[in-house]
Image (cartoon, coloured by chain):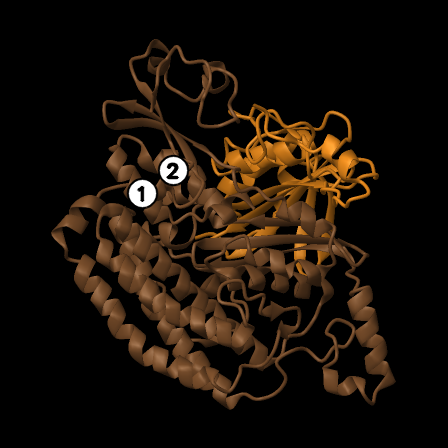
Amino acid sequence: MHDSKDPVEAIRAQFPKACLEVVTFRGETTIYIDPPQIADVCLYLRDADGLRFNFLIDVTGIDYYPDEPRFAVAYHLYAMLYNRKLRLKVRLPGDNPHVPTVTGVWPTANWQEREAYDMFGIIFDGHPDLRRILTAADWEGHPQRKDYPLGYETVQFSFNFDEVNRYKPYAKE
Amino acid sequence: MTIAQSYQAYPETSEWVGDIEQIKHLVSPRALTGETVLLNMGPQHPSTHGVLRLLLELDGETIVNVIPDIGFLHTGIEKNMEAKRFEQSIVMTDRMDYLAPFSNNLVYNLAIEKLVDLDVPERAQIIRVLVAELTRLNSHLVWLGTHAFDIGAMSVALYCFRERELILDLFEMISGQRMMGTYIRPGGVWRDLPDEFLPALEKFLEYFPPRIDEYEALLTSNPLWIDRTQGVGVITPEDAIAWGLSGAILRASGVNFDVRKAMPYSGYETYDFDIPLGLHGDVYDRYLVRVQEMRESVRIIQQAKERVKKVKGPFRSQNRKFVPPPRSELGHSMEAVIHHFKLWTEGFHAPKGEVHVMVESPRGVIACYLSGDGGNKPHRVHFRTPSFIGVQALPKLAQDHLIADLVAIIGSVDPVLGDCDR
């Protein structure tokens, strides 16, 4: 067993241009990675001695609307050998967000990236099966974007009965 | 039931209105020539434990591939939480995994507490461990009952639900609700344990352990049970880790990973308990691990019960910026009135930042990613739910097995579709 290495130092040494920023909040380290290099960095973090982040806890999309770069994808890694967590993050532009997939590194990323695609419209390049997962296949828009309205049904009273009735979705024959 | 190859639509669902082109890359080339058969299972199938739809590609009775289709129970919980104040959305976490509501409460509240840096008094920690382990028993009882029922052992289901009723009674005592307690709140728990709780718990702890022996007498060495479960749905430790599986599935493959030991929360490091491990990673070992977990949970509950008798003190943090003052203070303290008013109209504000917390739920690792933007509402909440990950691995687990084994495998993964779809 090798001694554990500091992931920030290791990434900086291995990928000189990949590490954009390091933030620590409440004892949790977040490393901002250059988006095109994320899959390589993940593979390195998984396999390198002293790091061994073998368990991908989750992948999640985040929308920072109206800031730019608008989107982010956060990867939460866990190393069972050294019992520590790490968060990687990539920031993506608002129009046409693309990031390489990490399904080749951890198969568990498959559905989680599909969820991020479904909810935020983030495209994971090289993903084997990038379809919608939680919403229906013919759903329009990406519901968890900040500019997607939180829908609700107008309450029907006697004064607006006809008006609400007109645009109520009834099952088609 | 069987869909002919010429069929252009999937009548069971409005989702895949298209043709086979959409899933062409998921089935084997033999499905396109009609050599293998596509069969729809669910979403109303009783053994899929909820509204899980599986599209099976079959060669005779052997499964070539499974294509899970989820989302029927998607309720937009994460989106809704962004529109509500931190404390208002605890009630929604119960509804995700409705068999283990307190684990979900716990992970969300731990995330809030970490984000705003809030203390939790010792008595509250003990009560949290107590209800979290009772939740584990509750969930495992439903799992064992339905799992055995799926495979054909009906009486186990009746016994399990009989004991579960007692746990639900305990939940009703502490939270007023049988299933969706919303009992755990930021900084502690909603209220102190009522006087009648501890005697009832003691009675339960006396009654329950022999019942586990009863279940085991029915199943563990039952040749029918062994035939249906041993060597079925095997996953190697390496694959289990790569597929992100956690909880009993991972431990049945022999990987010693339990968040309660690895990254203890709520004082789990001070309790004496063991992590049961399996050897073969099959359905039978998952059964053994979960049954053993029930015994370990009883051990933890017994220790927590002794501690809760000794440790008195507040059951919720005294930090008035986050926790509303008790009713008795409002009559004589102006400051308390102000805090009360502020917390119920505006809520508390969280700093800009992000936290990630893991908790060992009965189904595996449930993790909560919570980020604040300085306001009184979360900027983003994300739950990594064990059922979502477990259902994803079904194709891996079920390959080359018979349809009848698939039922056993689904039961051993123990998915709750509310947890899966959120």
Image coordinates of residue B168 in percent, x first then y, are: 44, 69
Q: Amino acid at mark 2?
A: Leu
Q: Is residue A105 left or right of residue B288?
A: right
Q: Amino acid at mark 1?
A: Ile
* Contact, mark 2 vs mark 1 (Cβ under 8 Å): yes
Residue B329 showing in the rendered view = yes
| Letter of the chain in orange | A
The residue carrying pointer 1 sits among few (fewer than 14), some (14 to 19) or many (20 or more) residues within 10 Å by Cα, namely many
Q: Identify which residue, A171 or B149, lies in the foreground.
A: A171
What kind of element bears circle 1?
A: helix
Write down the quadrant of residue A91 in the picture.
top right
Residue B409: image tag: 1
Q: Identify which residue, B118 or B227, lies in the foreground.
A: B227
* Residue B56 higher or lower than A4, as above or below: above
Read off the residue under disc 2.
Answer: B394
| Separation of marks 2 and 1 at Cα, in angstroms | 8 Å
In the figure, what tint was chain B given? brown
